[in-house]
Image (spheres, rainbow, N blue to C red):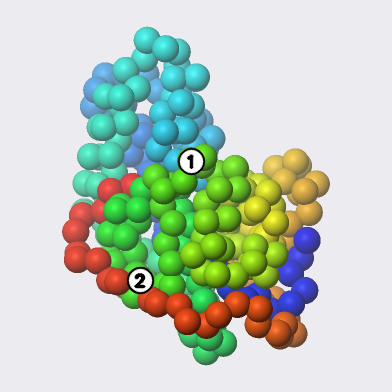
Amino acid sequence: MTPSFRPQAVVLDLDGTLIDTEPLAARAWSLAASALGLTFDPALPSRMVGRNFADCRALVIEHHGPRYPADRLMAAWRDTYDGLVEREGLALKDGVAELFAWLDEAAIPRAVATSTRRERALAKLGRVGLASRLHALVGGDEVPRGKPEPDIFVEAAARLRVAPGDCVVLEDSEAGVFAAIAAGMNPIMIPDLLPPSPDLIRAGPMIAASLHVALEHLGSLPAKEASASNDRAIIAHPASRAPRR
């Protein structure tokens, strides 16, 4: 499943792939639960990586039971996370600058497909200066089913007007990699907080130790004749605002 031709488009995850937000998110869960006086399993956030807001809520209820005040926790998590971002800022993952320089030089269109809601994703992307360098964005609230279902990647390919099989996906999460495989795309996993599981390894995606390694591989691939229109608009840069995941 390792990509063998230069992609016609690259689809990128956001949290944990482009922006180093997963440690902030994990801290926010514990801080929010503590502020509310709630018990909360600190191992649960690892299961939420790559999942949309609704799926995270379902995981909380599944784990802690139907009487657990999941909605209160979700609201507190959001406020706590936003506070951490305001105080500590957002940092790009190592290799992002080089990746976008290569995409620009090679004139390869790119989209972000993130479980984060669109408005929150736009705010994050604007904050780190990437919004104006994308050709499309699909948020987790814009598709019926979240990762590991393929919906978000299928929609990203459609917005780029590129066949899914001609797209490479860069992802840190297992849910995202399985979603890319289900969409018929070529994923490269760059693990962030969690190592790849045996099930993921058996699925056969390329696993790269860093974005630098993934980029080195992509840059070495032979070109494939373009099969999609190059008439794509860069998405508008959003006004600066506090990000909401």
The correct choice, above or below, for 230 with respect to 60 in the image is below
Question: Seen in the image, is 78 located left or right of residue 98?
Answer: left
Residue extending furthest toward the bottom: 105
- Indicate which disc residue 235 carries: 2
The quadrant holding residue 137 is bottom left
The correct choice, above or below, for 179 with respect to 205 in the image is above
Rendered location of residue 37, percent (x, y): 26, 19
Q: Which residue is mark 1?
A: 144
Calculate the distance from the C-alpha at mark 1 to the C-alpha at mark 2.
22 Å
The quadrant holding residue 147 is top right
- Indicate which disc residue 66 carries: none
Disc 2 is placed on an element classified as loop
- Please, what is the three-letter code of the amino acid marked with disc 2? Ile
Residue at coordinates 51% horizontally, 40% vertically from top-left? Answer: 145
Question: Seen in the image, is 144 located left or right of residue 245?
Answer: right
Q: Quadrant of the N terminus?
A: bottom right
Dot 1 crowding, Cα within 10 Å, few <14, some 14–19, many 20+: few
Residue at coordinates 43% horizontally, 72% vertically from top-left? Answer: 135
